[in-house]
Image: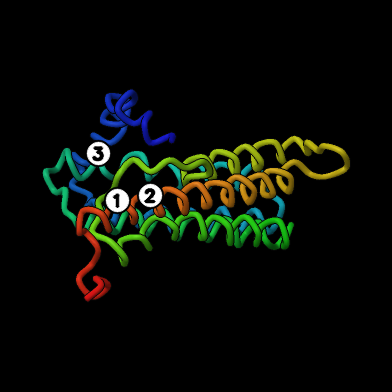
Amino acid sequence: MLGKLRPAISSFVNIIAYPFAAAKINPNLFSFCAVPLAIAAAYFMMQQQFYFTFIFSVLAVSIDLFDGAVARLQNKSTLFGNYFETMVDKLVEIILFIGAAFLFPLAAISALGFSLFNSYAKPRVALVIITDNRDWPAIGEHGERMILLLAGILLSIFSVSFLGHQILELLLWSIAVISLAGAFQRIFYAKKLIAEAEKNGNVLPYLKKK
C-alpha cells in the first residue's frame, strides 16, 4: 500500500541517493549496511535506550527507500540486486523484532510470526501457478509494519503508555493483527489467481492434471 507513494517522492529519494551513487558505493553493499544498523538498533532496544534505538532503526529502515535509487543512478540495477535488497529488508525486520522480543516476548514473536505468514502468502502462489508480481491487495505490508514499529519506538522515548500497557507492546500487537488480516487477504486473492490460472492453463506443468 505504501509502495504506491514511491513515485511521489522519487525526486527526494534521488537527491538523498545521489551522494552515495557519486561515491561509487556498490548498491548491494549499500543495501547490506542496513543489517549492522538494525543490529545496533536491536541492541539499544534491549537496553531500553529508545532514543538511540529510534535513530538506528530509522537509518536501517530508510536504506530500503534509497538503495534502488543508488543502483539506478549508477546504471547498476540488476535482477539479483532487486532480489537481494528485499532479502535484506526482511532480515532487518527480523532483527528489530528480535530486539523487541527481549522486552515484550509474546507480542514481538506474534508480530514477527504473522509478518512472515503475510509475506509468505504472496510468493508461495508462484509454486502453484505461472504468475507475476501483481499489485496484491493487502494490509500490513512491510512498510506499514515498519512505520508502526518506528512509532512505537519513538513514543517509548517519552514513556507513553495506554491502559497500563507500554505503547510499543500495543503497537507490536497491532502489527500482528494487521499482518494476519493481510495474510488472509492474500490467501483469498491467491485463490482467485489460481482459479484464473486453471481456466487459462497457466498452472505449473508438474501440477497439471493429466
Residue 125 image position (x, y, % from top left): 35, 60
Say which element carries label 3. helix
State the residue position of label 1. Answer: 196
Amino acid type for the residue under numbered disc 1: Glu
Give the answer, above or below, for where 204 lies relative to 12: below
Please report whichever mark, 3 or 1, sits nearer to the chain's N-terminal start.
3
Residue 64 vs residue 54, the one in the foreground: 64
Q: Is residue 31 left or right of residue 173?
A: left
Type of amino acid at the residue the image marks with label 2: Lys
Q: Position of residue 10 (x, y in %)?
A: 29, 28
Rendered residue at 11%/43% (across/down) = 75
Q: Which residue is mark 3?
A: 69
Where residue 192 sits in the image (x, y, percent)?
Answer: 38, 49
Q: Which mark is residue 170?
A: none
Say which element carries label 1.
helix
Which residue is tagged 2? 192
